[in-house]
Image (tube, grey):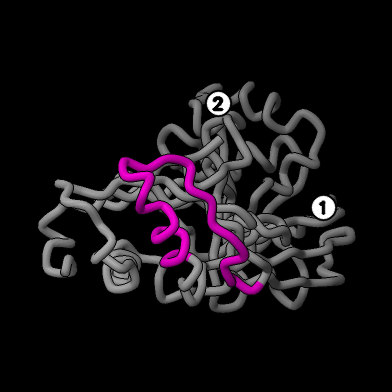
Amino acid sequence: MKKIIIISILLLFSIKGFSTRQVEDYLIYGNDTLRFYNSPLEQIDSIAYNIAEYNNYISSDCWNGFYAEWKIIDNTLYLSKVFDCEYRKDINEIIEKLLGRKFTNGLLKADWVNGSFWSGKNLVVERTLYLSIYRYERKFLIKNGEIIEKEEYNYIPCDYESENTLLDFILQTFDWGKFPVQSYLQFEAELNIDSFGKIKGVKIIRSNIPSFNNEIIKGLNQLPCWAVYYWKGERDNSTDWIDMEIKYEKIEKYIR
């Protein structure tokens, strides 16, 4: 399945999920603000059900009815605030009633939290629909609220991520002398990318000028790089798609 980005050059990307993207907890870690992929509060049995007893607002992007703010201080995870999704108001008092514990100086040690938790920073909006894709990922291995291990996964950038830079490369790479007289060029191509962001192969899915397909393949194979993204430490885009429509006025000066 592919996700369409609506711009004059359409980039189509594979996605891994089908449900509405949920409001995410956020984590303050040093100078960074990260987004948790899953809420550590979910490790408390029936937490969503119990909160709903006090506040029963649920929406398609907030199935739990709440989201939370967390902090890591001296390698310890603390819960600092919990909000309801309807009015974004602080519901810490409800959490205190449910847990039978009080926040101290605005913090509650999350000693019930165990396991691996993924978080991300710098959302890639054009790649995000149902599933959040971030430029930077952090995984925390937590035991009784203490951070015992951390891992980082950073995306590999490329100068040809934007519409304008990609179009500029395409226009200068194709041999337009082989292009028949047409009003436009339209094609969809599948790109296979290695773990370093290099193009391993190009396959034309469709085009309005099949005789120009070999030129398209040759040109796209010359792309110096392609951005590589990760989701939970695994490559998100070993395969990507370009769906491009180039108007005649853009290519007219290149035709010899």
Instruction: Give SS at disc 2.
Output: loop
| Residue highlighted by disc 2 | 55
Q: Secondary structure at mark 1?
A: loop
Q: Amino acid at mark 2?
A: Asn
- Check residue 113 in the rendering and tell me which mark sits there, or answer none: 1
Q: Is residue 212 magenta?
A: yes
Query: Earlier along the polypeptide chain: callout 1 or callout 2?
Result: 2
Q: Amino acid at mark 1?
A: Val
220 sits left or right of 28 in the view = left
Q: Residues within 10 Å of mark 2 (few under 14, many from 20)?
A: some
- Location of residue 73 with respect to 202 vertically, above or below: below
**Camera-side residue of 156 and 198:** 198
Taking depth in this image into account, of 158 and 23 the one nearest to the observer is 158
Q: Nearer the viewer, residue 83 or 207?
A: 207
Q: Could you say which quadrant of the image residue 110 lies in?
A: bottom right
Real-space CA distance between mark 1 and mark 2, rounded to the nearest whole angstrom = 24 Å
Screen quadrant of the N terminus: top right
Residue 69 lies in what quarter of the image?
Answer: bottom right
The quadrant of the rendering that contains the C terminus is bottom left
Residue at position x 50%, y 26% from top?
60
Does residue 151 appear in this view? yes
